[in-house]
Image (cartoon, rainbow, N blue to C red):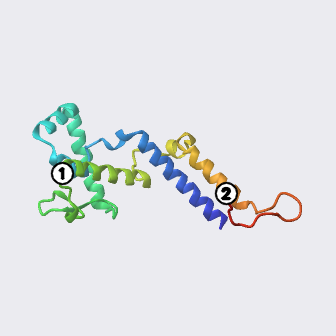
Amino acid sequence: MVQVQAEDADRIRIKNRRKRYLDLHPEYTHGSNLELAGRLIRRFQSPAERQREGRERGYTGSLEADLMRSEAKLEALRHPDVNSAMAYRRAEDGSITGVEADREERAESKEEGRARWVEVMSQRFLRGEDGDFEYEAVDQNEDLDDRGEEEQRHLEAYLARQSEEFVGEDKPRGETGVQDF
């Protein structure tokens, strides 16, 4: 029982550290080079925004993004993820197409798409599913702990172990339990 509680406490501490990391590093979710970002965000971009993004990436950046999207599609086709917001299938011509898993919950605006993208990427990060990220550095970083929360937890544990006692002789006198004003 104590072993299970310690494992749960460690798991929660790690998730809290990852969440704190995301709060301190919002740039983690700013990339829009994945297929899902394209479905949720890029479809609301103006042609000028897409052109600017393409120029910022450059030719090799665009090729890299295409390659990464293709590899991500193949991986998703081989190993479907029930947590993914996208579902993939191979079309008759051999191409791989992706559709939003919940069509009725399709983003209606760029802001809504961005919010969904941040949520999907955050949940993926918290679960530890980003194969390109070094989680060990975050999971072992005590600087990401919420010191106030830790102190509160220690205080509550201490108080739970204490028993009520009267400091003095005999029994308390003069206390009726009713406040007199």
Q: For the residue marked with disc 2, what is the amino acid?
A: Ala
Q: Is residue 147 visible?
A: yes
Residue 134 lies, in percent from the top left, at 46, 43
What's under tag 1, amino acid-wise?
A: Ser
Tell me which corner region of the image, top left, top right, bottom left or bottom right, holds residue 57.
top left
- From the viewer's side, name the closer residue of 181 and 47: 181
Q: At x 28% / y 50%, what residue is drawn? A: 115
Residue projecting furthest to the front = 181
* Residue drawn at x 20%, y 52% as measured from the top left: 39
Secondary structure of residue under mark 1: loop
Against 76, residue 135 (above or below) is: above
Front residue of this view, candidates 48 and 160: 160
The residue where tag 2 is placed is 157
Q: Locate residue 6, reporting x and y percent.
A: 62, 59
> Which of the two labelled residues, at mark 2 and mark 1, occupies the earlier sequence position?
1
Q: Locate residue 136, reporting x and y percent.
A: 51, 45
Marks 2,1: beta carbons within 8 A: no
- CA gap, disc 2 to disc 1? 47 Å
Q: Position of residue 30 (x, y in %)?
A: 30, 41
- Counting labels gives 2
Residue that badge 1 annotates: 109
The 10 Å Cα crowd at callout 1, few under 14, some 14 to 19, many 20 or more, is some
- Element at badge 2? helix
